[in-house]
Amino acid sequence: MAGYYCGNEDYNTKLVTGALAGWNNTGKFKGYDFHADVYPDFSANGTYSTYLYEKRATDIIYFHDQRKPLFMYMAFQSVHFPLQAPQKYIDMYKDIKDNNRRVYSAMVTAMDDVVGAIVNALKLTKLYENTIIVFTTDNGGQTLYGGNNWPLRGRKASLWEGGVRGVGFVHGAGVKDTKRTSMELMHVSDWFPTLLHVAGANATGTKPLDGLNVWEAIADKSVMSPRTEILHNIDPMFTRPYSPTPPMRPYINKHGVDTLHGHTALRMNKWKLYTGDPGYENWDPVPSLYLNSTVDTTCLVSDGYHPDCVTGPEALKEVPSVRLFDILADPEERHDVADYFPHIVDTMLGKIAAYNKTAVPVVFPKGDDRCDPALHGGVWGPWE
């Protein structure tokens, strides 16, 4: 195991400054964060992290005892902010005027080369033909740091499709119908029981799982996913980080669901229902725009509320507190059809009410000053 504890860090120095909403020490504590197993690994300082993960992953493959099975989880730091890449990759994208997009593209290419090196290691060790490779993501692109979700609506940290739809691919042994795109429903929690199944194991003895085994739907184009519903999120305390929450029209319902505060998103078959404010709701510009102009991402993300914006924000307009979209027919979420399908809205609000009954209270622990790396040899890590 190798990597870091914090949510982000410098790709080269492995330094990170601590931040927590409402903490009086945000921006004050700074330390080193790269570990080999549980121990600080200072030899990583100065090496671009994508290369470190390449070395670690390929070593595991080359020295693996092939008489035993192998499971490897490779979570790249790329392409999370801060935007950093080796200069040789940045130079490949001189035609992209927007600096964020240029460096972001360089980071993607560096990561892509490392994925190629890992695949090559599998081939050289004769493991490739009996290996399943899963490449996926955890959220949509962050438009403030070079990401782009066009033509989908929204971004990372919003509940729109641009924020929650993750693309990926599955390659290798057991995939019967190849070179195709599947639109079957799958949630991140499904990977655990799915990969257990592929490995010939099962979840007997575990706690009850939310995940489902969707392997047959992945492997065979004629099989439908057993998943028909995804609860994307219920957050009763959500507020927009860069701009005010717009005023909303209340939605009276028999289930007692509060549609005015926080936000919720529920997918049921082709339908997706929102309550409250789904978050940043714009559509990104066409990616080719980055080639000949600098996109004002600061204002793009803040809806004009950042002080550096040339033009100020538009007056906030009242929006519905309940919205319904047919994702199969309208993946860009441009047409709210809640008024046309009140029975679907009612059914889905009932499901949300049922989820709310089992929800535990929201808890945000306060910052603990004992975490200061200065008290622990200048290193971030567990402190008690």
Image: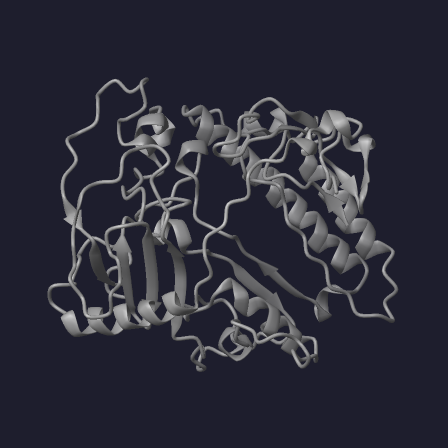
Q: Quadrant of the C terminus?
A: top right
- Residue 332 appears in the figure: no
Pick the residue in front: 320 or 304: 320
Q: Quadrant of residue 89?
A: top right
Residue 138: x %, y % from top left: 51, 52
Q: Quadrant of residue 131?
A: bottom right
Residue at 64% from the left image edge and 43% from the top image edge: 113
Residue 287: x %, y % from top left: 36, 38
- Residue 156 appears in the figure: yes
Pick the residue in front: 150 or 364: 364
Along the horizontal axis of the image, is 145 left or right of 319?
Answer: right
Residue 34: x %, y % from top left: 74, 36
Q: How many marks?
A: 0
Along the horizontal axis of the image, is 209 left or right of 35?
Answer: left
Instruction: Check the image and report above or below for 20 versus 333.
Output: above
| Residue sticking out furthest to the left | 340
Residue 21: x %, y % from top left: 48, 34
Pick the residue in front: 100 or 379: 379
